Image (spheres, rainbow, N blue to C red):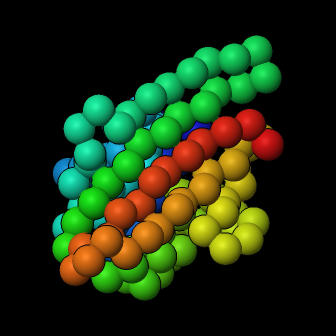
Amino acid sequence: MRSALILVLCLFAPGIQAGERYVPGFEALPLMAGLEVEPGSAMAFDKPGGRIVEAAATGNVPEARIRSWYAEALPQLGWQPAGEDLFRREGEMLSLAVTAEGSSARVAFRLYPQ
């Protein structure tokens, strides 16, 4: 049921399009256009208390644009804002650490138990 809801939201949510790329290791976390996943950055750990997933992406995209895109896209996928660059869904937290690197930006995604 949850997977079907995510699929429907991905197909019809503004800014999220069918055929879009996703962040590796994350369940239905879209990768914003203009970002590329850093090779070797994806890691996942399953623990009795929940899972921990990390990945990073970089691109020639302004830092503010990354923040605003995810702030709009994630609530459409069931993630509720829980602070600056922090989202909550079904007992899990998703944090985005967005930093400027010269003319480009880097975003580190981290999912962990609430």
Q: Residue at x 67, y 39 (%)?
A: 112
Image height of 15 relative to 43, above or below? below
Indicate the quadrant where residue 83 lies: bottom right
For the question of whether residue 2 can be seen, the reply is: yes
The single residue placed furthest to the top in the displayed view is 48
Image height of 27 relative to 81, above or below? above
- Where does residue 50 sit, x and y in percent of width and height? 71, 26
Image height of 86 relative to 61, above or below? above
Residue 29 in the figure: left or right of residue 45: left
Q: Residue at x 37, y 75 (%)?
A: 100
Q: The N terminus is located in which quarter?
A: top right
Q: The C terminus is located in which quarter?
A: top right
Indicate the quadrant where residue 84 lies: bottom right
For the question of whether residue 10 can be seen, the reply is: no
The single residue placed furthest to the front in the displayed view is 102
User: How many discs appear?
Assistant: 0
- Where does residue 68 sit, x and y in percent of width and height? 47, 81
Q: Residue at x 53, y 74 (%)?
A: 71
- Where does residue 94 sit, x and y in percent of width and height? 62, 51
Residue closer to the observer: 62 or 23: 62
- Where does residue 55 sit, x and y in percent of width and height? 41, 42
